[in-house]
Image (cartoon, grey):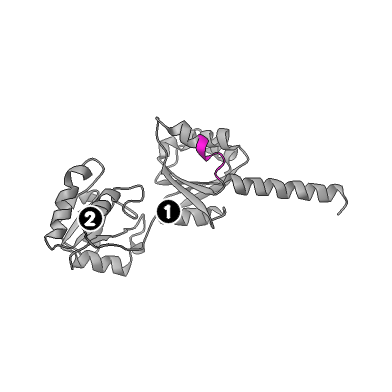
Amino acid sequence: MARLYVVPTPVGNLEDITLRAVRVLRESDHIVAEDTRTSRNLLRHLSISKPMSSYHKFNEHGVVEQIVQRILGGQTVALISDAGTPAISDPGYLLVNQAIAAGIDVETLPGPTAFVPALVDSGLPCDRFAFEGFLPQKKGRQTRLQQLVAEPRTMIFYESPHRVGKTLGQFAELFGGERRGAVCREISKKFEETVRGTLSELAARYADKEPKGEIVLVIEGAGSAAKKARNADTAAEDTDNGR
């Protein structure tokens, strides 16, 4: 039966693609890609040749109905982004939404996404977390940051390399310089790196040093920071009481 497959692709190391993802791409009639040039490199590596069309944030409203009609006409379509899982800080939501509205079966494969390994590697609590993706660049940015000051869960952000220093400085100012964080870059690639520290330390490190590659910022939540402060106070009281 014709359907829409949402297929995650590697965020770095091409070996991270799943066997199932390869099979689905091979069996699909048409592949819809965020950037067909980038995706052709991946498909060439996998020895897959399929008709392709582009679907990105600048054209999604104009082409979504064409894709829906393609599936309703009997074709199986696979949606991929440049890296990671479509619809997670990448185009995909609109197509999935419209496909469901048209009665099309949608099947999303599990697979690579950047924020999960970054969260675990940060060393911060990962039983509860808030994924924020990209913050607004201008309008609404300060308002959103103020709303997150009291967020108790670990927070995850995507950020471009040239804004990392500024963003960490804003975090330190609003959330408190002693909050812990991690800057994760180039996940699953050759120069993968995770730098951990307080927000003050990280802001100072990247104030005049622009990191290279794809960046994920993981920030300690207010709940974890408050718990740590309470534990420190209890330990100090125990010391004062001679325990």
Mark 1: secondary structure: loop
Residue 232 in the image: x percent, y percent? 73, 48
Which residue is the site of mark 2? 99
Magenta-colored stretch includes residue 180: no
Which residue is the site of mark 1? 187
Q: Which residues are magenta?
A: 146-151
User: On the picture, is 172 further left or further right than 90?
Assistant: right
The residue under the point 17% across, 53% down is: 67
Q: Amino acid at mark 2?
A: Ala
User: On the picture, is 2 further left or further right than 212?
Assistant: left
Circle 1 Cα neighbour tier, 10 Å, few/some/many (<14 / 14–19 / ≥20): many
Mark 2: secondary structure: helix
Magenta-colored stretch includes residue 150: yes
Quadrant position of residue 177: top right
For marks 1 and 2, the one nearer the N-term is 2
Residue 1 in the image: x percent, y percent? 18, 68
Relative to residue 203, is residue 231 depicted above or below?
Answer: below
Relative to residue 66, is residue 25 depicted above or below?
Answer: below
